[in-house]
Image (spheres, helix red, strand yellow):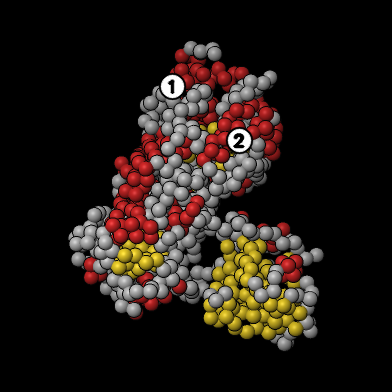
Amino acid sequence: MQILSRSAVLLAAMHATIVVGFIGSTANAAGNERGIAQPQRWPQAHSQGLVEPQREARVTEMMARMSLEEKIAQTIQGDIGSITPEDLRSYPLGSILAGGSSPPLNSDERAPAQAWIDTARAFRAVSLEARPGHVPIPIMFGIDSVHGNNNVVGATLFPHNVGLGATRDPQLIFRIGRATAAETAATGADWAFGPTLTTPQDDRWGRAFEGYSESPDVVRSFAPQMVRGLQGEAASSGSLQNGLVAASAKHFVADGGTTQGIDQGDADIAEDALIRIHSAGYPPAIEAGVMTVMVSYSSWQGVKNHGNRSLITGVLKGRMGFEGFVVGDWNGHAQVPGCTEESCAAAYNAGVDMLMAPASWKGLYKNTLAQVKSGEIPQARIDDAVRRILRVKFKLGLFEAARPWEGKKNVLGAPEHRAIAREAVRKSLVLLKNNGNVLPIKGNARVLVAGSGADDIGQASGGWSLSWQGTGNKNSDFPNGESIYAGLAAAVERAGGKTELQVDGHFKTKPDVAVVVFGETPYAEMQGDLRTLEYQAGDKRDLALLQRLKSAGVPVVSVFLSGRPLWVNPELNASDAFVAAWLPGSEGGGVADVLIADASGKAKYDFTGKLAYSWPRSAAQTVLNVGQSDYQPLFAFGYGLNYGDRNTVAKLPEASGVAAGDWNIDKYFVRGRTLPPWQFSLRPQSGVLAMQIVDAAGVQEAGRQLVWNGSGTASLVVVGGASTIDLRRQTNADLSLLMNYRVDEKPTAPVHLALKSAGHVTTLDLTSQLQSAPVGEWRTLKVKLASFVDAGADMAKIEEPVAIGTGGKLRLTINVLRLESDPQGAIKLPAVK
């Protein structure tokens, strides 16, 4: 390989600087416009360990041999669910990724580690083939290792960032990063899409759990430690392939600052807040040598970040001196005005170096090639992007044949990694209440363990756990994990006590104390967004469990699983002790380490966790951050009791501060009742259709039996208030309408499932589903909301979300109507023509 002189290297670097300077100056020409940053106001930084003369010479020599087609391909990333290794022969893409629910080749998302290794090797082998007209360049394999190598069965799952922030332990963050890198590299990936450096300001945001804290100071202290953990020290000149991976600081910038906490929304804030609050983690991450930065879906002052040149090129690459490459988010470029999934010159020209085009990579390649040839995208911009990508690949060591960590045994779920995760669980627990010093629990006690999360590792792990939304998991999917119940049982039994697991809280022998583990069920981006912070608004089943135990005279210890602080005043009142456990991951034994003492009552570990997010006094306190002028939390930032404290939390007010129905756009009929603002209406009111209350699925009066007599056409309709609801994001996130039903008499005529939007009724054909259902047997149907879009519905202006109707005879009982995030088993129904 030809080695260029130092003068040639400096010339190439100068060329890249000129490109950056040109684009940055263009963006700043109108610095007083909205969405235009003024770089001189931003903190300065500089990438460490990326630009090195010999490496730059190798990059320059390689680029000189590459065709324009090969350069374009390097700037595109496809998802393994939509591309095969053989495709790389015609389209030599620079990168592949495994999206949140994308399985390895010829397998499923819960495949063993070897399937992931085989997938990485198959793609890499084709990318490195020696064939005419092809410069062999290794593929870069990225994956969402956001709390461990969380896509792979058997991996150690660490607490999500919302819990890690409570530890206030940057060195622990470094060790978690190092363990995550080892487990990621062992299964064939080169690149972890983390750390997330968001600073969430509105806890309604469904990705708040991915942020370390509402405080930029906490984010700033953790950012470089996670980067160093994943990548090693920036100054290292050796290959990172020996158990390290590339990191990706994300999502640039202000993804946690959107109005009303709407995911992918608009951060309509001043530049001062953008700098002071939302950019805090980026300069230290860049100084630590972070190799990639991922752009946010969101906007700043109405300008989509994927198309914002002043932020990407002027600030990130210019002022902050970032010398790695900028990657887009999943089809994020398609949200830039004038762009589609297959075409976005604006994102390239803004400074995005690699576009994430999961299934649209082929069209994007063809259009980008045409745009470069026409001059719409300057050749210099593509050369700059390719230089940055190759720079990272050389630094990462991908051109070296040896991959000593890939396939290494005894790395996934290694005991030393599980020990770190268990330590993190202990340190992340925050004790909010301990009236009467019910904690710690004496080890020789009789302990009832209850609640939906007690023996559910999936619920404790949250989103981004084996699947995108973290749904559909069983404990057996976590072979190296331990549920909270299992950890409690082991600790109690070691100390001479006894445990009884009863999820519903109905005990056989009265216990000395009950530990109730409950909280949010898993969710990830978009699907986790809330309207208010009230926990289980309109459906207080967990509160009922706590109150039943209290009324039986059993001391209650609540262990609350959540991705953010929520308004839980009634649940706090029904608990003697209350522990915020966040989303602890696969090492539930860490909870027992702190809660369970020895037989004498001496605790093995004390509580050390401190709130990294302020806890709301009412469900309406959706924006509640330390430093606000009107700051009035229930529990302040930094709060957290320990066993030496003798604080008593008085009874709290139980008025949520939110009007009934303001919170609910996704639950219509649950547990025997319609939830505000929704009600059932029979149309027409003519005697064609009758409805009566019945027992359902073993629960008294939990169902509604609907009887059509065949004398005309009638429908059961879910109606709400005067306002419409917007379900576009739920539709884009692939949510479904779930109906739990029983056919008691088969239909004699077509049956329709419909919704009304913007004054128009969109109708799907439900007939075959009900005709094929066995009479008298409970079934669950999940119909993708996308079915309605395909049939022409406007999901932005929904007036009536559900209607079921027929003109024939039918006897149908339902006991659930709601939206569902788990896509498993969901189907599309055809439109009625």
| Quadrant placement of the C terminus | bottom right
Task: Say which of 542 and 652 sits in front.
Answer: 542
> In this figure, which residue is indicated by the disc labeled 1?
52
Task: Say which of 693 and 351 sits in front.
Answer: 693
Task: Find the residue positioned furthest to the bottom.
Answer: 687
Q: Earlier in the sequence, mark 2 or mark 1?
A: 1
Label 2 crowd bin: few (<14), some (14–19), many (20+), radius 10 Å? many
Image mark count: 2
Q: Which mark is residue 722?
A: none
Q: Which mark is residue 76?
A: 2
Amino acid type shown at disc 1: Glu
**Res. 780 visible in picture:** yes
Q: Residue at x 60, y 32 (%)?
A: 122
Q: Is residue 246 left or right of residue 173?
A: right
| Quadrant placement of the N terminus | top right
Q: Position of residue 148 (x, y in %)?
A: 44, 44
**Res. 220 visible in picture:** no
Against 673, residue 484 (above or below) is above
Cα separation, mark 2 vs mark 1, equals: 25 Å
Q: Position of residue 400 (x, y in %)?
A: 50, 23
Amino acid type shown at disc 2: Ile
Local secondary structure at mark 2: strand
